Each structure stands twice: as structure tokens, then as C-alpha cells.
Image (spheres, rainbow, N blue to C red):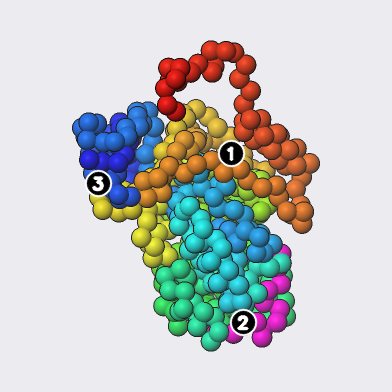
């Protein structure tokens, strides 16, 4: 007998090439069958999914979930249950000095899978920026030893390379990050922002499988130029560098994305979700996926870029509904219409579809609601964002304590005298 049967949804699983009506059966936390017309009498629990979109659990390749351990961290469980994200990749929140804590207190306690890119700086992201100012904290030997001890929890290396993070040290932090990634045989993810160092300098040190995040940002001046990719970006694309969206609070520009898509760039979709961007304009991974629909991608392309492609980029076993895989499943209401979406500069596009998560399963288990904590006091939010947060807290409080008043609402479920 199956433990769970999701019945009658549109299953979109690009990893296995499936797009169409099907049932999804789960047993002992793994996918047991995916096919139309599976017999419901074989399942202990049947969930009707007709009219819904059923996908593999989403893989968010650029997040910050060192909750309580740094400047940017959020609680992944407060987001996972309502968004369909079942695999989180923390992008450099912790370096050698604190990644044990991220592993012990977040990854081991989270309802979803949490992996990490180790920051080349031992400090990680304990502050807003500046982690590469003191080169003594960028000890490759120490980071390599720590990463090796943590095994497959560490899926890559992260370095933020812009004028604020590197200070007077230029490209040296990046050179050390490259050395660490090569020693670990794992990909390097590089954040770009306002230079120097400039994108052309950074890309010259990256190789096949390394990841350029914030690839559609309006901040660097040499991602695109005159309506085309710059020479450095073209060479990186040809060399097999992976491009990652990394939306965040300030790194997504529709006009830059338009140029890149026209030139053949197919970015991985990630949210760069953190203590500020969770309040907008990123909000969550399904919202960012909707923005790629607005940019002209098809639904299967969008699902692929948020499931199997990021899973493969960092080497995690996720992002598929193949029989035998862990039963990480996301269910969405796919609302048709015209939905306005924003980039970080106020640019507006219209998406033909909006994805609203209705259920998230990790290893076949439905994730329960988890209320998010208020933002930390050091995160600057606009008045509108503060008001929205207050409204969310009031709504959460009200929903947590319903008040029923009719006698019929409390009808006895058992006859009088029966054992309860």
C-alpha cells in the first residue's frame, strides 16, 4: 500500500520529461509511482490535485538561512512550507569559523534539506559587508579542512567580490576562493556588484561549472553593453560558466535579463532570499519564477530552472519526481491572468501565470505552517514594508486563535458516555 497518492494534477517534471496529467504515489518517503490512473484504493491517504500543478520540490540555489548566526539569515522553515522549496543552498553565510553551527543548528533541525557554500572568508556574513578586508581570515587550508570534515553538506564555495567586500585587496580574495574550490573539486559561486573588481576581471578566473550569481543585476557595468553581452560574458558563457539569477533586494533588472535571454543565456532561477529580500521585491522563489514567465519563458522552462538545473549545478540529489527519488513535492495553484511583477528598479512586466503554493512535501511528509519572526532591527525596510509586516503578524495572530460561538460548532463527536 502507498502512504500517499496525489491524484489528477498536471505533473511537470523536466528531469524525467514528464508534462501532463498524472498521479503521484509515495511510499516510505520515496516516489513509488508516477502515472495516470493509479488506483486510489491502494493508498492510505488520497489528496485530490485536479486543477493543480505538481512539480518536484523546488531547489533554491542562492539563499541565506543561517538564522540567528549572521546579518542576513532567515528561518528556512518559515518559508519552505508555503513556497514549495524543499532544498536550500545557503550561499556563503558561514565560513570556516561558523559553518559547524550552520550545519548543527539549521541543517540538522530544518524540515527541508539544507546544504551550503562555504565562504572563503572564515567570518562569513556576520556583517553587511567587508568580510574580505583582512586576508588573514581567508585561510584556504583551514577552510578546506573544515569543508572536508562536513562532507556533502558543503556543496561549493562562495565569494562576494565587489568594491565593498574586498576593500583594498582587489582580486586576491577571489584567487583564494578559486584555490579552495579546486581543492575541494566543487563549484565556486561568485557574487558581483559595484566594481572594481569588474566583471571582466572576475570572469577570467572562473571555469566550467563555476557560478556567476546576480547575472541580471543592473549594478555591474560590464554584464551587457549596447544591447548585447560584453566580450567577457560571451567568453564565460562559451566556457561553461553557470549563470544564476540571485534576485535579492537589488540584483534583478528586466532590461539586463532581456539582453541576456536574447543572447542565449539561460540562468538558473534563485531568490537570494535573506532578511531584507524576503520582504520584497523577491519575496520567495515562486515569485521570482513568475518573473521569468513574464520575461517569456514557458512553464516547463521555469520549473526546470528551479528544480533539476540547480540540483545538478551543485551536485545535490533533488529536483526530480523520478520513481525511487526522495518524495520532495510541490503543489501549486497556477492562476491564469495578467499579473504585474517588479524588478528592483521599479520596472514592471506582466506574467500570464501566477504560482501560489498550496502544499509542500518533504520525503512524503506535508510541511506544517510555521510563522515567521519579525525582521531583525538592523534590516532597513520601507514604511510600506513595515506596515505589511505588522499586518502579517496581526493576521497570523488572528488565524492562530479562531473564535467559534455557535453550539453546533461544538457538536459532540462521540455519544455521551463513550470513551474519548
The percent position of residue 174, horizontal first and vertical second, equals: 58, 78
Cα separation between marks 1 and 2: 39 Å
Q: Earlier in the sequence, mark 1 or mark 2?
A: 2
Position of residue 9 relative to residue 241, above or below, is above
Residue 138 shown in magenta: yes
> What residue sits right under mark 3 in the picture?
32
Q: Which residue is drawn at 58% across and 58% down?
A: 65
Res 56 label: none
**Total label count?**
3
Residue wearing tag 1: 341
Q: Which residue lies furthest to the front in this view?
A: 417
Indicate which disc, 1 or 3, sits on the residue closer to the N terminus. 3
Q: N-terminal of the two: label 2 or label 3?
A: 3
Q: Is residue 299 magenta?
A: no
The answer to whether residue 51 is above or below residue 240 is above
Q: Please tell me whether the stretch drawn in magenta is mainly helix, strand or loop.
A: loop
List x then y, in percent, for residue 54. 37, 39
Q: Quick one: quadrant of the C terminus? A: top left
Q: How far apart are marks 1 and 3 (CA)?
A: 37 Å
At 75% from the left and 48% from the top, the residue drawn is 381
Which sits in the foreground, 390 or 92? 390
Q: Mark 2 points at which residue?
A: 138
Q: What stretch is highlighted in magenta?
A: 128-140
Residue at disc 2, secondary structure: loop
Numbered disc in front, either 1 or 3: 3
At a point 33% along the width and 50% down the height, the residue shown is 29
The answer to whether marks 1 and 2 mark residues whose Cβ atoms lie closer than 8 Å is: no
CA distance separating discs 2 and 3: 46 Å
Assign a secondary structure to mark 1. Answer: strand
Residue 217 in sight in this render = no
Label 3, secondary structure: give it. Answer: strand
Q: Which residue is drawn at 54% across and 80% down?
A: 143
Amino acid at each position: 500500500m502507498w502512504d500517499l497518492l496525489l491524484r489528477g494534477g498536471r505533473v511537470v517534471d523536466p528531469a524525467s520529461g514528464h508534462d501532463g496529467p498524472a498521479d503521484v504515489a509515495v511510499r516510505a518517503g520515496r516516489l513509488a509511482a508516477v502515472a495516470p490512473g493509479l488506483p486510489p484504493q491502494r493508498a492510505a491517504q488520497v489528496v485530490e490535485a485536479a486543477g493543480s500543478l505538481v512539480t518536484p520540490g523546488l531547489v533554491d540555489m542562492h539563499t541565506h538561512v543561517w538564522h540567528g548566526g549572521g546579518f542576513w539569515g532567515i528561518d528556512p522553515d518559515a518559508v519552505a512550507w508555503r513556497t514549495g522549496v524543499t532544498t536550500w543552498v545557503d550561499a556563503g553565510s558561514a565560513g570556516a569559523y561558523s559553518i559547524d553551527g550552520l550545519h548543527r543548528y539549521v541543517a540538522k533541525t530544518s524540515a527541508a534539506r539544507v546544504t551550503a557554500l562555504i565562504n572563503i572568508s572564515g567570518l562569513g556574513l556576520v556583517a553587511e559587508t567587508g568580510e574580505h578586508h583582512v586576508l588573514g581570515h581567508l585561510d584556504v587550508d583551514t577552510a578546506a579542512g573544515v569543508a572536508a570534515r562536513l562532507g556533502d553538506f558543503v556543496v561549493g564555495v562562495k565569494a562576494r567580490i565587489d568594491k565593498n567586500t574586498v576593500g583594498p585587496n582587489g582580486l586576491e580574495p577571489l584567487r583564494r576562493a578559486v584555490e579552495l574550490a579546486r581543492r575541494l573539486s566543487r563549484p565556486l559561486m561568485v557574487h558581483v556588484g559595484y566594481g572594481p573588481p569588474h566583471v571582466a576581471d572576475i570572469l577570467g578566473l572562473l571555469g566550467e561549472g563555476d557560478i556567476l550569481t546576480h547575472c541580471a543585476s543592473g549594478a555591474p557595468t560590464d554584464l551587457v553593453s549596447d544591447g548585447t553581452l560584453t566580450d567577457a560574458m560571451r567568453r564565460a558563457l562559451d566556457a561553461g560558466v553557470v549563470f544564476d539569477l540571485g534576485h535579492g533586494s537589488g540584483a534583478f533588472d528586466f532590461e539586463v535579463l532581456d539582453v541576456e535571454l536574447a543572447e542565449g543565456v539561460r540562468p538558473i532561477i534563485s531568490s537570494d532570499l535573506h532578511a531584507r529580500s524576503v520582504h520584497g521585491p523577491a519575496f520567495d522563489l515562486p515569485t521570482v519564477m513568475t518573473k521569468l514567465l513574464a520575461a517569456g519563458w514557458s512553464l516547463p522552462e521555469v520549473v526546470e530552472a528551479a528544480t533539476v538545473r540547480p540540483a545538478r549545478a551543485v551536485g545535490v540529489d533533488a529536483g526530480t519526481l523520478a520513481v525511487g527519488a526522495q518524495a520532495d513535492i510541490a503543489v501549486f495553484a497556477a492562476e491564469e491572468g495578467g499579473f504585474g511583477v517588479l524588478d528592483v528598479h521599479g520596472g514592471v512586466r506582466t506574467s500570464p501565470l501566477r504560482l501560489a503554493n498550496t502544499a509542500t512535501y518533504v520525503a512524503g511528509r506535508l510541511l506544517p505552517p510555521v510563522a515567521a519572526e519579525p525582521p531583525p532591527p538592523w534590516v532597513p525596510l520601507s514604511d510600506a514594508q513595515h506596515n505589511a509586516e505588522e499586518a502579517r503578524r496581526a493576521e497570523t495572530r488572528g488565524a492562530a486563535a479562531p473564535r467559534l460561538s455557535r453550539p453546533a460548532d461544538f457538536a459532540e463527536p462521540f455519544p455521551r458516555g463513550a470513551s474519548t
